[in-house]
Image (cartoon, rainbow, N blue to C red):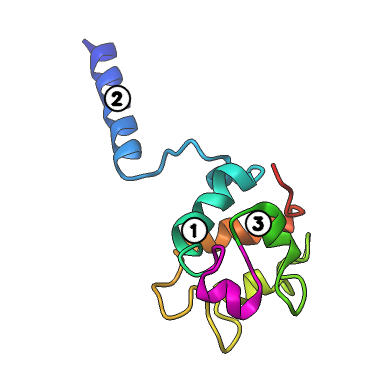
Amino acid sequence: MRSIIGKFKLALALFALVSFGAVNNSSADWGGIVSYQEDVYPIIHFRCLSCHGEGDVGTVQSGLNLETYEGLMKGTKHGPVVIPKNPLISNLNVLVEGRAKVRMPHNRKRLTPCDVEILHRWVQQGARNN
């Protein structure tokens, strides 16, 4: 009887962790290596491409096309937005973290703290195309 109750408690605890989002498959959430394809690009796709895709207003004005890794790393017509291993001076981080006059996404809902942290750690880890 005691082992059944213990298993029930364990199952209930795991259910609670999964239900409240404490368990996630992303290595970025566990402090591991942040993947451009699995962690960074989904943020860019859902939060940035409406302005920074081919021919969109953000791309036309700044030259920053975020449709590809190469476009992100190329940066704007004024220079790079990502300085690998240096999120403190990477404009990508400065803009999404709200450390500049202009904040990105511009005139839209801010990125979540988790998304900001993923971008920060990705740049800190070298901004690789992984």
Q: Is residue 43 above or below residue 76?
A: above
**Depth check: 28 or 13 in front?**
28
- Mark 1 or mark 3: name the one nearer the start of the chain: 1
Indicate the secondary structure of the residue bearing disc 3.
Answer: helix
Contact? badges 1 and 3 (CB < 8 Å): no
Is 69 covered by the magenta stretch?
A: no
Name of the residue lying farthest toward the top: 1
Residue bearing the label numbered 1: 114
Residue type marked 2: Ala
Indicate the secondary structure of the residue bearing disc 2.
Answer: helix
Residue 75 falls in which quadrant of the image?
A: bottom right
Magenta stretch in the rendered image: 52-65
Q: Which mark is residue 11?
A: 2
- Check disc 1: other Cα within 10 Å, few if <14, some if 14-19, many if 20+: few
Indicate the secondary structure of the residue bearing disc 1.
Answer: helix
- Check disc 2: other Cα within 10 Å, few if <14, some if 14-19, many if 20+: few
Q: Residue at x 45, y 65 (%)?
A: 50
Residue type marked 3: Arg
The mark closer to the camera, 1 or 2, is: 1
Cα gap from disc 3 to disc 2, whole angstroms: 33 Å
Residue bearing the label numbered 3: 121
Quadrant location, the N terminus: top left
Q: Residue at x 29, y 12 (%)?
A: 3
Q: Is residue 72 visible?
A: yes
Q: Position of residue 112 (x, y in %)?
A: 44, 64
- Mark 3 or mark 2: name the one nearer the start of the chain: 2
Residue type marked 1: Cys
Asked if residue 34 lies left or right of residue 84, the reply is left
Q: Is residue 13 above or below residue 124?
A: above
Asked if residue 75 lies left or right of residue 41, the reply is right
